[in-house]
Image: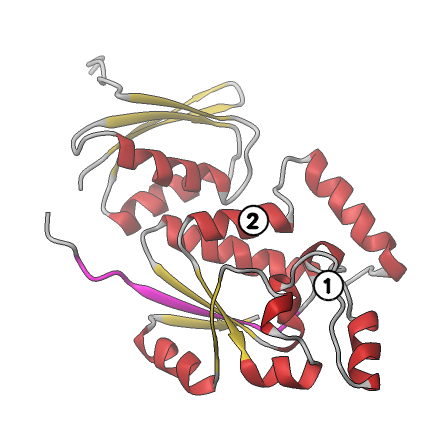
Amino acid sequence: MAEEKKLETTLIVFSGDMDKIMTSFLIATGAAASNMEVTMFFTFWGLRALKKKNVRTGKSFMGKMMGIMEGGDISKASPSKYSMGGLGRWMFKKMMSAKGVPSLEELRKLAIELGVNFYACQMSMDVLEIPRESMIDEVKDVVGVAFMLEHSKNSFSTLYI
Amino acid sequence: MTEEIKVDLELDLKGLLCPLPMVRVSQNIKNIPVGGVIKATATDPGSLADIPSWARTTGNEVLKTEKEGKDIIFYVKRLK
């Protein structure tokens, strides 16, 4: 059986909102299960999806403040609507688990199992003062926009979420 | 027309929602030989459209789809 070239798709995950991260992982796992090569490029608020649990980020005063305000890993993401100071997150989690929808952590784990490639944006890591050590080991590499564009060029679709 | 389909693997996908039914089929189809058949039982109505789409995208075949109450039963043949 000759190995045929896989279709590739690229996802740019800019948002750190729970619902948008969830959609990103749904598309990524679905694509990987459909035998596609999936590149996920996480930038700005989307970096939250790659953070380890319970890490404090930030070096400068403002960076530390940002780390506290934007703090927390994927489980601390709030929905883009009805955030309500954390209440929305709690409600969504309850509703999702009641219906048997996997949590964000489980979706991310599934994506890893299916061979989805995670990349983090160097520039936004610098701006937000999020070091590589604060992110999960499965991040393949820390890259820039040219790397993302190269993958986008080889992809049949590129989504910005 | 009542020809029996020989099933190599049965999957219980009841209660799973998108994208899990297709993900589980894709993960398990690697465990059967080419030409083999998976019988997958799902309850997610979305899978009615999803499993056939997945099969077309990956070059496999849904031989038959049955509905029994809330259960949706797919017979998926591995073609490659």
Q: Which residues are magenta?
A: A4-15
Instruction: Name the kind of residue labelled 2 in the image.
Output: Leu
SS label for mark 1: loop
On what subunit does the disc labeled 1 rest? A
B11 versus A129 height, above or below:
above
Toward which corner of the image does residue A149 lie, by quadrant?
Answer: bottom left
Helix, strand or loop at label 2? It is: helix
Instruction: Check disc 1 and give the amino acid type.
Output: Val
User: At 31% across and 22% down in the image, what residue appears?
Assistant: B9
Pinpoint residue A55: horizontal percent, then vertical percent.
73, 63
Labels 2 and 1 in the same subunit = yes
In the depicted structure, whether residue A55 falls above or below residue B76:
below
Mark 2 is surrounded, within 10 Å at the Cα level, by few (under 14), some (14 to 19) or many (20 or more) other residues, namely many
Q: Measured from the top left, where is residue A57 in percent x and y?
A: 74, 72
Residue tagged 2: A107
Residue, disc 1: A55
Based on the picture, tell me whether residue A6 belongs to the magenta stretch: yes
Q: Quadrant of residue B52?
A: top left
Residue B54 within the magenta-colored segment of the rendering: no
Residue at image x 41%, y 87%? A146
The structure residue drawn at horizontal position 70% and vertical position 64%, both measured from the top left corner, is A17
Work out whether residue A130 or residue B60 is closer to the camera in this orientation and state it.
A130
* Disc 1 crowd, CA 10 A, few/some/many (<14, 14-19, 20+): some
